[in-house]
Every structure is written in structure tokens, then in C-alpha cells.
Amino acid sequence: MAGIYDEPEFYAAACAYRDVPSEANSLLRWWRQHRGQPDPAEQRPHSVLELAAGPAEHARELAARGIDATALDINPAMCGWAQARAAESGFRLTVVEADMRDFSIPAAGQTGPGAPRPAQFELAITMLNSVCHLLTLDDLVAHLTAVASHLAQGGLYIVELAHPADCLSGDSRTSSDWVTDLDGGSVTVRWGGARDRIDPVTQVTREHVAVTFRKQDGSVRTVTDVVPNRFWTATEVDAAIRLAGGFTVAARYGDFDGDVPLNDPAAWRMIFVLRRCHAG
């Protein structure tokens, strides 16, 4: 049975409330602030890799700004949809179908025998709490190891996760229900909520999802799914970073606007800015 990740149009509509251009501005600002040995003349990276990209909204936005963008996702429907949207917009997007826990993107122009050398990106990103699909510590460590092997020295990996308050307090920072008006109609979303309990041992929830797309032509369709989702604490992410090696934590933020600290009452996301360094 098809789920929400097999329906790229519905998934993209469900996430259309995000201000992708503004978030891309923040990603580029953090890249200028936190990368290793910054050159003031460099205002943006030459290359970016979006992981667990889905419709690849952020990779496509950065590609539209002239950055060499690559989007990686495990779902073939998402990969095809992202590629088609980029082609319609007239800019180049490289799409890779692969598992975010174990992937290898070869550098361009390699010849000769031996294992291919991984492509080196100046910026990698994972948005919309997609790290929640990594359900174990081993998964997260493997993912970080794979990302590190594809980042140039001093490059950044920016990871957006859910804020810990969503699970560790009675004051959730995000809503599980929302409605977004679109050019082609409107979308009503219910993504998890109070009825979906977290497993106290695995820290995994099975989130019930319902997305209803009401199009201007009068058609109405609902896609439902049950999505496993791992809740990660800040200390667990820190531990995974140390186990994987190759990264230092350059900064933590609680929002894309105004560099809100993670512990600020207004923080609603948990954003790690990791800098690539020598392992060990």
C-alpha cells in the first residue's frame, strides 16, 4: 500500500507552509559564519548535498541561486518528482536514489582502477526532521560517517530536528494539525498528535498521518499513513557525533530566524551546525 512518501505531490503540499527561500538564506548565512577558514569573498558554497531530500525544496531553491545542488533520497517516487520539478524550472539538479545511512556519490571525472573517490561538497543539509527516520544510534552514527566522507575540509553539515520540548514537556513547540492555502487549492494535514504515544524504550512513535488535498477543480483526495519516527535528544546527537568522528559542533539554533538559541523559550526546532574536521 502506498504511503505519504510515495505521494510526492501530497507530501510537498503538506510541507508548503515552510518559507523555503528564507530558510535557504539562513543556511547560507550560517555557512558564511561557521565554515572553516572563511574567505570573505565567498558568499555561498559552490556545492550542496540535501539528504533525505524528498521533494528537495531546499536543494532546488539553492540550485536556482546558481549552486551545484545534489538531492539524495531512498524513495524513487520522490527522486523522480524532484528531478521533474527542477527540469520544469530550467535548472540543473543531480538526484541520487540511495539510503542516507550508507551511500557513496563518486566524484565527477574519475578514471582508472580502484574504488571511486567520494564527491566532496561544501555544504550538506537535512531538513524537516528527516533524521527521525534513523531509528537507532547505529543508524545515526552510520549516517554521520557517510556524510563526513562527502564533505570537504571545513565544510558544514546543517541538521534540522524537532525540538526536544515536543516530547519532553507538556508545551509542544509545533502543531500536529494545520491548513495551508495553495495556488491549486488547499491542504489539511494531521501529522501525529496526542494519540500517538512514544515508546519509552526505543523513543519511537508510530505517527498517524492524514493529508487531504482539495483542488480548485473540486476534486478531494486523502492520503493516510503510519510513519515510524525516532525522537532524538540533544545529548544523544552529541554522542553520535563523537562516535562517528570527523565533526565538531559549530553552533546550535532553535529557529531559522534571528539565530535563536536552542534553550530560548521561543525555540521550536533543534538545528545543529557541524563543521567537517579531521577524524580523531
Image (tube, rainbow, N blue to C red):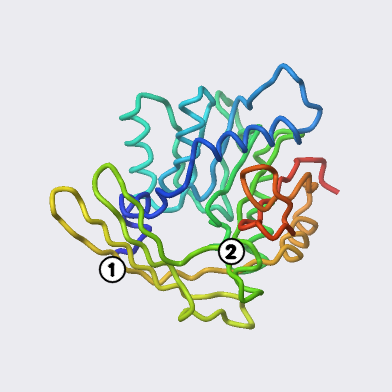
Residue 107 % position (x, y): 58, 31
| Residue that appears at 45% across and 71% down | 192
Residue 55 % position (x, y): 41, 45
Residue 151 % position (x, y): 68, 38
Which amino acid type is marked by label 2? Arg
Crowding at mark 1 (Cα within 10 Å: few <14, some 14-19, many 20+): few
| Residue that appears at 32% across and 62% down | 211
Q: Earlier in the sequence, mark 2 or mark 1?
A: 1
Instruction: From the image, tell me which residue sits under label 2.
Output: 173
Element on which disc 2 rests: loop
* Residue 70 position (above or below residue 79): above
* Residue 163 position (above or below residue 113): below
Which amino acid type is marked by label 1? Met
Q: Quick check: 201 left or right of 62? A: right
Q: Residue furthest front?
A: 265
User: In this orientation, does residue 114 appear?
Assistant: no
Q: Residue furthest left?
A: 218
Is the residue under label 1 in contact with that under label 2 (CB below 8 Å)?
A: no
Q: Quadrant of the N terminus?
A: bottom left
Element on which disc 1 rests: loop
* Residue 4 position (above or below residue 118): below
* Residue 59 position (above or below residue 134): above
Crowding at mark 2 (Cα within 10 Å: few <14, some 14-19, many 20+): some
Residue 11 numbered mark, or none = none
Instruction: From the image, tell me which residue sits under label 1.
Output: 1
Q: Quick check: 84 left or right of 67? A: left
Residue 230 % position (x, y): 57, 69
Quadrant of residue 233 within the rendered picture: bottom right
